[in-house]
Image (spheres, rainbow, N blue to C red):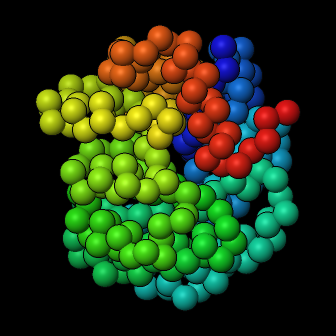
């Protein structure tokens, strides 16, 4: 068994007492590789340190839409400094998670868009894939990404919430979707149909640990080893054998993050 968890947050406080055990336990359950996604400057630095400490952890750096503030120039400059310092670090594999989130507030819409676009441009400048977080914002997300200049970036929509416009972008371009614990929750017929439309080559699996625990462990602290429930669900939705799904998603993840499989 070979599993790639493409999105987790092991810098979260909930792991501070037993992280060594959790990472080892994941490994014993087939989790070969993990990408630690960041949500702030502080988290970006912590993610880098996790990648230094654990052989199978890679990292992404970025500022999440809920972390935007009026110091945008300073923040983007600081993020670019971290990028430059790590540009030859093989473990830096993406910019993320970045994007738009209007779930809690719409007051910061314009600022969120500016943070998002400036980080997308950093990804282009340094030739890195992008992990996108998009919640209740799909029409603004579509309006930004439809620009031809974003056509060639490797993008994954993390915690993919299917909408018609974003699904169209994924199918038309070289974009991918990250499927997580929420696919094991009750879904509408329409969203199930949209997920079924995405070819298996465009899918990667993720936990978003410590959040988003899949059924049957919903409500507990999530860990990468729980990704098996997500893989089972993808196999069921796509009607493909579990071991084929597992291998395909693993290969998709290596390809997406441009990691050589040694
Ligand atoms: Zn996340």
Q: Quadrant of residue 107?
A: bottom left
Tell me which residue sits at (36%, 44%) in the image: 160
Can residue 206 be seen by looking at this rendering? Answer: no
Q: Residue furthest left?
A: 189
Q: Which percent across, then down, holds residue 211?
A: 43, 37
**Quarter in which the C terminus is drawn:** top right
Q: Nearer the viewer, residue 216 or 146?
A: 146
230 to 134, vertically: above or below: above
Q: Residue furthest front?
A: 172
Q: Quadrant of residue 55?
A: top right
Tell me which residue sits at (39%, 76%) in the image: 147
Tell me which residue sits at (39%, 29%) in the image: 181
Q: Which percent across, then down, holds residue 26?
A: 66, 22
Q: Residue furthest bottom?
A: 73
Is residue 142 toward the left or the right of residue 173 in the image? left
Q: Nearer the viewer, residue 173 or 105?
A: 173
Q: Which percent across, then down, holds residue 236?
A: 35, 15
């Amino acid at each position: 068994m070979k599993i790639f968890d493409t999105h987790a947050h092991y810098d979260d406080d909930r792991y501070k007492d037993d992280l060594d055990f959790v990472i080892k336990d994941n490994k014993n359950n087939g989790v070969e590789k993990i990408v630690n996604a960041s949500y702030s400057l502080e988290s970006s630095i912590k993610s880098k340190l996790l990648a230094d400490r654990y052989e199978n952890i890679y990292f992404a750096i970025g500022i999440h839409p809920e972390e935007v503030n009026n110091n945008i120039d300073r923040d983007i400059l600081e993020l670019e400094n971290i990028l430059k310092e790590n540009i030859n670090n093989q473990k830096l594999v993406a910019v993320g998670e970045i994007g738009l989130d209007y779930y809690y507030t719409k007051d910061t819409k314009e600022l969120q868009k500016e943070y998002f676009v400036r980080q997308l441009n950093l990804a282009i400048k340094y030739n890195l894939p992008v992990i996108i977080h998009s919640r209740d914002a799909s029409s603004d997300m579509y309006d930004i990404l439809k620009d031809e200049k974003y056509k060639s970036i490797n993008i994954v929509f993390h915690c993919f919430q299917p909408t018609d416009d974003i699904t169209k972008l994924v199918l038309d371009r070289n974009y991918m979707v990250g499927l997580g614990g929420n696919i094991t929750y009750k879904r509408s017929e329409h969203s199930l149909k949209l997920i079924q439309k995405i070819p298996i080559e465009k899918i990667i699996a993720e936990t978003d640990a410590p959040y988003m625990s899949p059924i049957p462990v919903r409500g507990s602290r999530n860990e990468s080893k729980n990704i098996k429930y997500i893989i089972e669900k993808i196999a069921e939705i796509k009607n493909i054998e579990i071991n084929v799904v597992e291998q395909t998603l693993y290969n998709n993840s290596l390809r997406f993050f441009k990691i050589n499989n040694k």
